[in-house]
Amino acid sequence: MNKTGFLGILKSAILALFLVGAIAPSSFAAQTAGQQSMAFDSEPLSIASPKGQTHKFTVELALTPPQLEFGLMYRDKMPADHGMLFDFGTPRPVMMWMKNTKLPLDMLFLDQKGVITHIQENAVPYSEAIISSNGPVAYVIELNGGVVKKLGLAVGDKVTSATIAAKLGK
């Protein structure tokens, strides 16, 4: 190979490395940004205590495996009357965590009829500690930390929403 041919190959190789270096970071940034948001449908949800008090929320719906995994990660804030309903389908033991979750959350674990069976208050942001449902559940609701205490929500309270009603055939 002559000197001119070698220089041409060298220039092409340097150009290729430059292009890869210029494109790869923007691709990585786009992938990272894409991981920090996900689309969710929402619906109204009510929580009623046996004493007759009813509390209304708007919840986003985590229905698909990617949505169930993503949840409320990366959120900086959430309105006081909002939350997320995770639908796990068939009742089973569920384990949650707070990885990449910036907000303290209250977690309400529900049976297939929408009755609260267990509550975890003020889950710690970013914690990778496992939060167990303490038995089979069909749904989990995440609300802003402190809402359970403020509203007096308790095990035995009944949750109603279109998603839960559809599964009950109502």
Image (cartoon, rainbow, N blue to C red):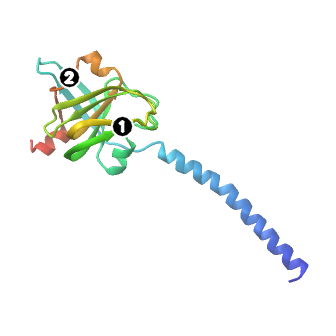
Give how far apart the Cα atoms at labels 1 and 2 are.
21 Å
- The percent coordinates of residue 102 (x first, y second) are 46, 31
Q: Label 1 belongs to which residue?
A: 130
Q: Is residue 1 above or below residue 115?
A: below
Q: Earlier in the sequence, mark 1 or mark 2?
A: 1
Give the amino acid type for the residue marked by disc 1 in the picture.
Ile
Q: Residue at x 47, y 30 (%)?
A: 76
Q: Residue at x 15, y 44 (%)?
A: 166
Q: Are marks 1 and 2 in contact (CB under 8 Å)?
A: no
Q: What mark, if any, has residue 48 been given in the picture?
A: none
Name of the residue lying farthest toward the bottom: 1
- The percent coordinates of residue 34 (x first, y second) are 49, 47
Q: Label 2 belongs to which residue?
A: 154
Give the amino acid type for the residue marked by disc 2 in the picture.
Ala
**Left or right of residue 87, residue 8 in this image:** right
Q: Residue at x 38, y 37 (%)?
A: 97
Q: Quadrant of the N terminus?
A: bottom right
Q: Is residue 51 above or below residue 29?
A: above
Name of the residue lying farthest toward the left: 170
Q: Nearer the viewer, mark 1 or mark 2?
A: 1
